[in-house]
Structures are given as structure tokens and as C-alpha cells.
Amino acid sequence: MAKPAKFLRNVPRWSTLFPVVLYVLFILCILVLAFSSRQSQSDGKLRHAEHGVANDIPNVPAPLVYRKLEEGVVKELSAAFAKADTNGDKHLTVQELAKFINFKIREHIDEAIRTNPMMFVEIDHKPRDGLVSWDEYQSYWLHERGIQGDSHMKKGMFDKLDRKVKESIARDKAHWMEAARTDPLSLTLDEFLSFRHPESSTVNLLNLVDDILRQFDVDGDDHLTIEEFSDVQTTDLGEGKKFILWQNVRERKEEFAKVIDKNRDGKADRGELLSYVDPRHPRYAIQEASTLFSLADTNNDKTLVMHEMLASSSIFISSKMIHTAESFHDEF
């Protein structure tokens, strides 16, 4: 009995252990309740997100990639998909996509041409002389963004501007100088359109026609023949010898005959070339739609469904299907 008695004397008293055990149990309960609550909220949000995606986007199993997309992006893509899907079968063909992109391009250019005079008049007021100066435009631009100052602001004030604002000002200044054909300090109404929307300016398109004629019009008759247009030289081997990609020649001959030479007389005049370079020409929409299909049609079934578009969301968001104006301005 001596050994058990000695053991019992060494065991901590229950009055000492009870508070410790109670505290440990309390902490464990708090942790279990907190974890259960968080898990329940997470599951609820996940079910809600999946349910929302399933309701808004038919035939989409809502894999993990969709849960990472912002709600605004999903809605934007879903709305565009629904408008482009003219027959409502939840599948987009390349023809449907091209038609919708062409509609967006025309809508953007028509809007740019329509609003240009109104903005021009709004900015042209110091003095109202039928010209927009850089000072007038810069003051208007800064005011629209809630920034105090003008083009003559002191260097200290300019240095305090956000880096992106300063980059935008520098980019605008470069585009301004390109558009200012008569006076580097001011723009006419047509020049202002070229500055803000170069893709919408007839003057810019005529300059593109001039560039094509300079590059391909060998005999200088201000017309292009099918042979001139299809003469694609990729490497100059010296002594007048040129390496020609024959596949490109065939493709360009086909393009000339089907797309450019509208009256089938074997030549393209300035009017036909102007139509060819106009962004509203269906060929641009067809090219963009084909490119989007090649990147997003993962199962190669020649149609796009919503989950394929969502899986390539960044490509579509930056395309003319969604953000037409930004896409154009990145190109010009």
C-alpha cells in the first residue's frame, strides 16, 4: 500500500486540473464553431455563385476558372454572347460573331462622328474661333478628371500628378502632333476627329490609300492591278532579285478579286481602295472573328459556347466584340 499511496500523493489535485481542462475545452469549442461558421458561409457563397452562373449561362458546369472571374466580366461577356447569338441556340458560329463585331465597329464609328462636333464646340471657347488649341483641350481633359490645372501648370504641380495621368498627357501630345496638319498648336474639326478617333477619320483613311498606292502602284497610274497588289516581296536578294511567297500571292489575288475589285474591271481605283481600308468593311470583322475562334474554340467544333468564351475571357474583353473603342485606340 506504500507505493500506491506515494503515487496518489504525486498526482495533481482535481481542483488544480479542472480549470485547465475547462479552459482547453472552451478554446476547442470556439475554434470548432468559428471553423464551421466560416465553412458554411464559404459553401453558401460558392453555391450561390454556381447557381448564378448556371442560371445566366446555359450549358455551363461552372468549373473553378469561372469563380475567379469578376462578376462584371461574366455579365459583360454573357450580354455580348446573347446579342451575337442571333438564332438563340446557345452556340456562336464564326459568321454570327463576325456580324456582331461588324455591328459594334459601325456603332462605334457612327457614334464618334456624331459626337465629335459637340465636343469640339464645348472645348472651343477661349477664344471661340473654330479651332481647338492644345491649351483648351488640356484644360478640358484635366477638368473632366477632377484635376486642378492646365497645360501651363508649374513643374511642381505636374510632378505631383499620378504617373498614369502624366503618361496619358504625353500620349495625347504625340497623337496631337500627328493629327495637326496645318498648325501644331490647334486642330480643325476634321483634325480633332483624327486626333480622338483616327479610325473614324476619312482623312486618315485617304492617307492609308496613298500609302498602298505608293507601295504597290508600280506604273504610277493611280490604280492597282491584281498583279501589282499581289506582288509580295519578303526579301531583297540584291540586283533586283526578290524572293516571293507564292502562297501569299495566291491569297492576295483572291482577296483582290473578291474583296477589292467591286466592279470586276481588273483594277482598283481610290474609291475601291478607300472601301477596302475602311474599318467598317466586313473583312476586318471576319478576320477578328476568325482569330478569336482559333484561340477559343478548344474542341474545334466550329462553334463557341459560353464556357469557351469565359475560359478565354481576357482575349474577348480586349477585342472589338466587347471594348471596341479601346481596341481601336490600342491599334492606332
Image (cartoon, helix red, strand yellow):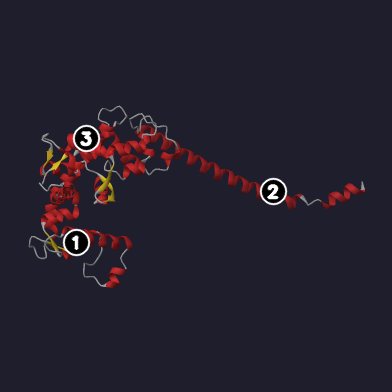
Label placed on residue 236: none
Asked if marks 3 and 2 touch (Cβ < 8 Å), the reply is no
Q: Is residue 280 visible?
A: no
Could you give the CA–CA distance between mark 3 and mark 2, rounded to whole angstroms?
Answer: 87 Å
Q: Amino acid at mark 2?
A: Val
Residue 195 pos. (x, y %): 18, 56
Q: Amino acid at mark 1?
A: Met
First along the sequence among labels 3 and 2:
2
- The residue to which callout 3 is attached is 254
Could you give the CA–CA distance between mark 2 and mark 1, rounded to whole angstroms?
Answer: 80 Å
Residue 173 pos. (x, y %): 22, 62
First along the sequence among labels 3 and 1:
1
First along the sequence among labels 2 and 1:
2
Tell me the quarter of the picture where residue 62 sits. Answer: top left
In the image, residue 315 sits, relative to residue 13, either above or below, namely above
Viewer-proximal residue among 79 and 103: 103
Label placed on residue 21: 2
Circle 3: is it few (<14), some (14-19), or many (20+) Cα within 10 Å?
some
Residue farthest to the right, as pictured: 2
Residue 240 pos. (x, y %): 24, 49
Instruction: Tell whether 214 sits left or right of 247.
Output: left
- The residue to which callout 1 is attached is 177
Residue at 58 percent of width and 43 percent of height: 32
Secondary structure beneath disc 2? helix
Of the two numbered discs 3 and 2 in the rendering, the one whose residue sits closer to the viewer: 3
Residue 47 pos. (x, y %): 44, 36
Secondary structure beneath disc 1? helix
Instruction: Tell whether 124 sits left or right of 244.
Output: left
Viewer-proximal residue among 275 and 19: 275
Residue at 56 percent of width and 43 percent of height: 33
Of the two numbered discs 2 and 1 in the rendering, the one whose residue sits closer to the viewer: 1
